[in-house]
Amino acid sequence: LPIAVLVSGSGSNLQSIIDRIEEGVLDAEIRLVVSNRPGAFGLERARKHGIPTKVLTHTDFPSRETFDAAMAEAIAAAGVDRRGLVVMAGFMRIVTPVFLSAFPHRVVNIHPALLPAFPGVHGQADAAAYGVKISGCTVHFVDEKMDHGPVIIQAAVPCLDGEDGDALGPRILKLEHRVYPQAIQWVAEDRLTVCGRHVELRVSGR
Ligand code: GRF
């Protein structure tokens, strides 16, 4: 499965994908890593593994749409089309229909909370502050709304008494590193079907 990974920061989810590919348990090939921030550590991780990178600084573009068009073009040029997959991994930008229409039902994101609870950039801290007893992470197909599209997989962690986002976050991140490669592998095996809000997972055994 040809994939492009979009990052803005540390890229630990990117690293988990690279590691599973190198171990031979994820049938994907990262054709390009795109960052909207030149200093993102995820770029370093990609370079270390010989993966092509591209920096597209969003502030260089007059609109979200022109930024998205440039990103879609770079990804297509790297050989990822609608049979491939775009993987948002800590990518801190909302994408517009300009981008999504180039990859219909082929863009996924990971969020550090159990959606639809606690969308937004502080999912871990918001869950901890609310006092929920369970939180976790969600991998979902991306639509025009932030942290909103059809859910592929979720995994849960208990929230401990008095824990804040800084304590909870790393435990959620560990789960992210397990479930994101799994979700991508399901796409690689062509086992997912989107029916409205629902994602059906076909049993394997072909
Ligand atoms: C993760 O918590 C992810 O869920 C969120 O941003 C963080 C990215 O971490 N969208 P990393 O860059 O993959 O280390």
Image: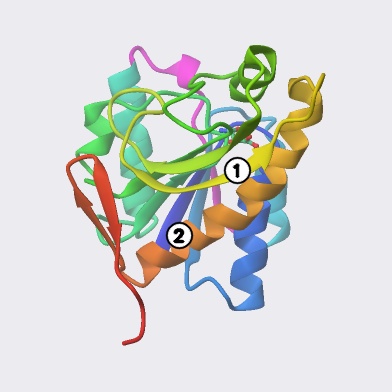
CA neighbours of label 2 inside 10 A, class few (<14), some (14 to 19), many (20+):
many
Residue 187 in picture, x, y percent from top left: 36, 63
Judge from the rendering whether residue 49 lies leftward or rightward of residue 147; answer left or right.
right
State the SS at label 2: helix
User: Pointer 2: what residue?
Assistant: 184
Of badges 1 and 2, the one in the foreground is 1
Q: Residue at x 52, y 25 (%)?
A: 92
Q: Is residue 190 above or below residue 75?
A: below
Image position of 99 (left or right of 57):
left
The answer to which image quadrant residue 162 occupies is top right
Tell me: residue 137, above or below residue 60. Answer: below
User: 175 or 79, which lies in front?
Assistant: 175
Q: Magenta span has 62?
A: yes
Q: Amino acid at mark 2?
A: Ile
Quadrant occupied by the N terminus: bottom left
Of mark 1 and mark 2, the one earlier in the sequence is: 1
Comparing 21 with 162, the one in front is 162
The answer to whether residue 177 is visible is yes
Q: Nearer the viewer, residue 159 or 165?
A: 159
The residue that mark 1 highlights is: 156
Quadrant in which the C terminus is drawn? bottom left
Image quarter for ligand 1? top right
Residue shown at 68%/13% (left/top)? Answer: 129
Seen in the picture, residue 203 relative to 201 is either above or below; the reply is below
* Bounds of the magenta segment: 51-63
Secondary structure at badge 1 equals strand
Question: What amino acid type is highlighted by mark number 1?
Answer: Ala
Judge whether residue 168 is colored magenta: no
Cα distance between the residues tagged 1 and 2: 19 Å
Q: Position of residue 194 (x, y in %)?
A: 22, 51
Whether residue 50 is visible to the viewer of this picture, yes or no, is no
